[in-house]
Image (cartoon, helix red, strand yellow):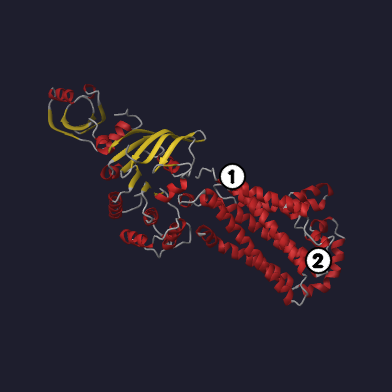
Amino acid sequence: MTLIRHELKQSWKSLAIWTAAIGAFIMTCLLIWPEMKGQMQGISSLFSSMGAFTAAFGMDTLDFGTLNGFYGIECGNILGIGGALFAALAGINALAKEEKDGTAELLLTHPMSRAKIVTDKLIAVLLQIIALNVVVYLLAVGSMAVIGEAVPWKTVSLLHLAYFLLQIEIACICFGISAFLWKGGMGIGLGLAIALYFLNIIANLSDKAKVLKYITPFGYAESSDIINNGGIAGDKLLIGLALALAGIGIAYWKYSKKDIR
Amino acid sequence: MEKRAIAAEELTKFYGKARGIDHLNLSVGEGEFFGFIGPNGAGKSTTIRTLLGLIFPDSGKGQVLGLDIGKDKKEILRRVGYLPSDNAFYTGMKVKDALKLSAGLRGKNCNVRAAELCGRLQLDTEKKVEDLSFGNRKKVGIVCALQHDPELLILDEPTGGLDPLMQHEFFDILQERNRQGATVFLSSHVLSEIQRHCSRAAIIREGQVIACDSVEKLARSNARRVTLQGTVRREDLPGAKDWTEIGGTTSFLYSGDINELVRMLSKTEIRDLTIAEPDLEEIILHYYGKDGEQA
């Protein structure tokens, strides 16, 4: 418990900044939505004539003129990228930061097993992601209520759930990588998150690359699919969960026998 | 057999091809004030880090307080206080929070002991750790290592940055703990420190313990520091080391037969002569050092 509390104390500032930034972005977009709504009909038809570009962001099958469509695309980009970056950073730093900052010797000479340290740090990362998503979710539905729109509960909840799971997956994969690092891996974490995002865009652009959707979590967190199908693709999600569990397993395996520098 | 606080048998650790320690043997009895001496890179920290489970040995066995360093690591850490050489702390924490964190990770309330130690070491607990000088940060590490009343204290280069007054207070505390039954394992390259405080010591060189004995015996090899005024020729004294001639004064370490020395000196004209016991520093430098053979 002490270690979890300590971890949260150490990272609350970063968590607050990321939450505020993502939350503010989503709120702003929603608050200007009533004004944009009228102009959207035209934009939708414009987008639909832009071919590959619209497909890349799933805008070919979403209607920008509806709150669902607008929110799917907007939420997909802001919470998708922002959340993924935050999750990647939280995961990649969790174990590696101790050696990078020279505090590993202090922490690991206290009477705790390596497994316990991995567990507590993992819980702290997951708690941060939960906190970020709960706050952002509340801000989103709150903003919808403020602009007087009926909240599309099912769609909004599904979208946020998908992005939440995406963040968990990325955090767990980065957490596994973190166990191998001793210099901090911000570049690796951010690079991985962005690479996964672009894998999905490539998959959207080319039918031959559709298989990539099974590798990247952005594949199951695709707003257009979720809105059009009314659910999250189970097969892709299962692969994602398996990758997350693999990341966690690797973290335990590696960290338990790691030589601390 | 006497109970042992630390026992290492053929402990070996290589970092890739780089040698950390190489078939190291070490035995420290419970209740000892033990010194661990060696130059930088000899393997002092590797030994300590292996004993504390921070790194895993390639081969060999190790026991701390009778417990196996592999499978009983948690219990060992519960009963040991460790002061790392470059003790880093989390940023943004006040001293009192850092001490509380350490106690909390041990699941122990150490407030009373912490306050007492901070008082004696004159450590301001309201300051942020990163704003402290190196010496004051060292004090935070010392309190962390001592506040839970460990049975074994492992201190890696503990006095760096401490002013002489604080060093004195620090060693007073260690002596008290030692009298109360705690074993003290002091790793250092400051020999005077070891000579003054430790009862036994081990000398480590290139990953191996090359000598382990009481500090008196380590220092009282038959070597003598001979200083004289007059003319002597180095060729006449094959056992002499560290030969210096300044003005008319010649000084050297002599470890051969003392009778031969006297016979040789009687043949020459000398105006002044002192023969003294060298200090541990000289002994180690010239008899356990890289160029010296084992005394």
Q: Is residue B85 left or right of residue A74?
A: left
Q: Which residue is mark 1?
A: A253
Q: Secondary structure at mark 2?
A: helix
Q: Hey, which quadrant is residue A127 in on the image?
A: bottom right
What amino acid type is highlighted by mark number 2?
Gly
Report which residue position mark 2 lands on. Answer: A69
Q: Chain of mark 1?
A: A
Residue B192, quarter of the rendered image? top left
Going from N to C along the chain, the mark reached first, 2 or 1, is: 2
Left or right: B251, with A191 as reference point: left
The C terminus of chain B lies in quadrant: top left
Residue B41 versus residue B104: which sits nearer the camera?
A: B104
Residue kind at label 1, given as amino acid type? Trp
State the image coordinates of residue B56 (x, y, percent, origin top left).
49, 40
- Residue A234 visible in the displayed image: yes
Q: Is residue A221 left or right of residue B76?
A: right
Q: Residue at x 77, y 58 (%)?
A: A232
Q: Do the residues indicated by labels 2 and 1 lie within the same chain of the protein? A: yes
Query: What is the crowding at mark 1: few (fewer than 14 residues within 10 Å), some, or many (at least 20)?
Result: some
How many labels sit on residues? 2
User: Disc 2 vs disc 1: which is toward the camera?
Assistant: 1
- x then y, percent, for residue A102: 48, 50
The percent position of residue A88, horizontal first and vertical second, equals: 64, 54
